[in-house]
Image (cartoon, helix red, strand yellow):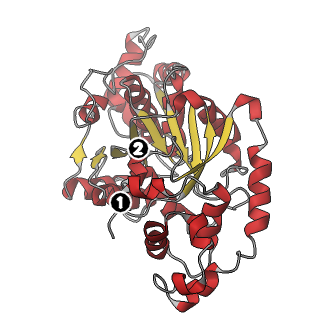
Amino acid sequence: MDSVSNPARVDEGIAGSHWRDWLRLCMTPLLGFHAQKVLIEALGGPRQVFEQPIAMLRRFVSEAQAQSLLRAPAEWSAVCDRTEAWLQQTPQGVLQEVWTWDHPRYPQMLRDTEEPPWLLFAQGQLQHACWQGVAIVGSRNPTPQGKENARRFADQLQQSGCCIVSGLAMGIDAAAHQGALESAHSHRCATVAVVGTGLDLVYPRQHHALAKQVAQHGWVISELAPGTPPLPHHFPRRNRLIAGLSHGVLVVEAALKSGSLITAELAVSQGKEVFAIPGSIHSVLSRGCHALLRQGAKLVETAQDVVEELPWGTAEPPRVGSPAKGDVFTDSNQQAVYKALGHEPQHLDSVLLLSGLSLEDALIALQQLQDINRVVAMPGGLYQCLH
């Protein structure tokens, strides 16, 4: 299906429509996107649709659909009341809005997608109304290195002028939002979280503080009305918005059957760039990325690899893998242990063998490296570098 044609024509006829009208249209039973599009393009907007006699409606939709349009959906009034209550809240000065199709802050990139939502619920800062999005997605249960890669890529891409778009989920999503927030500027949108619930809820619950930070330095967005719980079928639809709001999608770690691959596929269908970070051939979480690479995704090792494929410039960001400020090893034992660990998780026995250090010296160096966030201890007596 094509994207909605001639947005200007649609906008001309909907000045009198209110978000309640758009919400009613979206909630009307039996009426899918295609039928909604036909009605809006023919009649001008949702209010005009609801003002038509059934004979006029039958010219564009089936008898059952026309009958459905004559009656307000059963839950519509209650959802409107919840939305009104949500709009009246002003949590610490954060703006809460409904962006209908004709709203000036409705993202043009979404208008150009195949099935754009007719309205969006948004929470954020007014000065962050525009952004240049790059999505970062991946596993909900990543490796420590995967989380660190997501965080660092997000930070460096954000410093290069990108807004990091993700889904506020556990794992890679959360790390990406956190990385984007590390050097966020008040005048620029750092990150956008697209969620699969109403915005009066936060899922997962432990991300309340993160969602609040995102709203203060960007936007939290949903096509779902306040009060909508986190149901499984909401998240694939959420993924299409993540892809739609982004010029490219970076997959950090993903299994072969993963929602992240759905996001990547949606990006391809929208003509967007797809990037993937390679990993160990022994890791299940590398297989999704390797599958994308075989299908033509760009292999990336640095944030610059992503930036150079985007339409707004090629300023050189810090390289992923370069030491962070203050990460200077204080003695040769730390250097020997760090070198011994390499790029894959290693058992303590391997560290001793490769470094040539005594057990006591190796343990001291490992603890020191953990203290400066350069090494993480993993289950089973394994250690891994955070490059």
User: Which numbered disc covers residue 326?
Assistant: none
Q: Residue 20's image quarter?
A: bottom right
Disc 2 marks a residue whose amino acid type is Ala
- Proximity of marks 1 and 2: CB atoms separated by less than 8 Å: no
Q: Is residue 197 left or right of residue 36?
A: right
Q: Residue furthest bottom?
A: 63
The residue depicted at 36 percent of the width and 31 percent of the height is 341
Percent of width and height locating residue 368: 52, 18
Q: Secondary structure at mark 1?
A: helix
Distance of label 1 from label 2 (alpha carbons) = 12 Å
Q: Residue 10's image quarter?
A: bottom left
Percent of width and height locating residue 211: 64, 39
The residue nearer to you, when weighing 75 against 5, is 5
Q: Judge the density around disc 1: few (<14), some (14-19), many (≥20) Cα neighbours within 10 Å.
A: many
Percent of width and height locating residue 35: 47, 76
Does any portion of residue 232 appear in the rendered image?
no
Name the quadrant of the N terminus: bottom left
The residue nearer to you, when weighing 6 against 111, is 6
Q: Which residue position is annotated with label 2?
A: 135
Does 337 sit above or below residue 40?
A: above
Q: Is residue 228 left or right of residue 117?
A: right
